[in-house]
Image: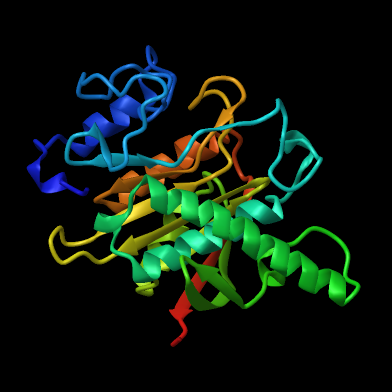
Amino acid sequence: MWQGHKEKPTSTRSMAREVVHPERPLPPWSRLLEHNAEGCLRKRSGEKEEHYEVEISNHLWSLWGSTQQVKPGENSSSSESGSERTSPPGQALACCVLACCAGSFQSLDSWNSSALDKIMSNGRGYYDESLATRQHWDRTGELCLECLNTTCFLDGHEFWVDIEKLCTGKLYSRTKSLGSALSKFFGQHLQTGILQLRDQALAFGFIPEFASGGAFFLFHCQARGRPLFKDCESAPYVLRMRKLQQLLYCMLITLDERRHNVPFRIYKVGCVPRAN
């Protein structure tokens, strides 16, 4: 349950220090850390919190799906290793689209661990259906966002999906940075989108909330092993924050790309529930 209004405020600068602190190279939301940034003990290994956990008071919260055991180097929809890929696997893209659908009709306040598991299971089904459609037309190659079906299902609801590339840029560029691209995205009052950089994909958005005034979110489902989990463990998760700058921080830490001028793409994702 979302209870951000009860947290004690801290500065955005303290969040930045927490992310890059030289004595704590792990992300502050890493499951390998026994305590959060406030010094509170996390759930013990094997115990799953169904609702949001506080990472940095009044600034950052996390929500985790079920932990899965994966083989070393295993990829969700391709036999290629992550280091060899130049685009995200199709199944990860499909799950990101389903996360956008969830954000379009479910309040972030109501999201829980079970909701993330449903996003993953329905995302796998969406990927399989899109792949079958592609094979029906004798098309080959990896599924990209533009190749996914225009309809999908989540928790019994059917959605019409409109995916369109909004902009491109280069990481840490002076003129076409990720920060500038996000400002452009939300400046057009768009709600949900997907960021692609090399073999990674992140769903993100801003969801208006009556009680809290709205919140940004980031959905990631490709993390395996360090720096978030033990070896051979994986789980989908959502980070929730109040400010655009905090979303940018979390994206950069999640992508973990230190080279400059690496190309990225941002897609806007429109999800419209269909009447039953």
Residue at 46% of width from left, 67% of height from top?
A: 101
Q: Which residue is outermost to the top?
A: 23
Q: Nearer the viewer, residue 83 or 225?
A: 225
In the visual, does 88 lie left or right of 84? left
Q: Picture coordinates of residue 226 (x, y %)? A: 55, 23
Q: Is residue 41 above or below residue 57?
A: above
- Quadrant the C terminus occupies: bottom left
Q: Residue at x 42, y 24 (%)?
A: 46
In-image side of 246 versus 94 (left or right) = left
Res 106 visible: yes
Image quadrant in which you'd find residue 72: top right
Query: Residue 177: horizontal and vertical position, in percent?
Result: 50, 52
> On the picture, is 45 further left or further right than 256?
left
- The count of marks equals 0
Vertical relation: 55 (above or below) 250: above
The colouring scheme, among rainbow, by chain, secondary structure or one colour, is rainbow
Which residue, as the protein is rendered here, is positioned at the far right? 138
Residue 117, horizontal then vertical, whole percent: 48, 49
In the figure, 113 relative to 57: above or below?
Answer: below
- Seen from the viewer's position, the closer of residues 213 and 43 is 43
Query: Is any atom of residue 175 visible in this view?
Result: no
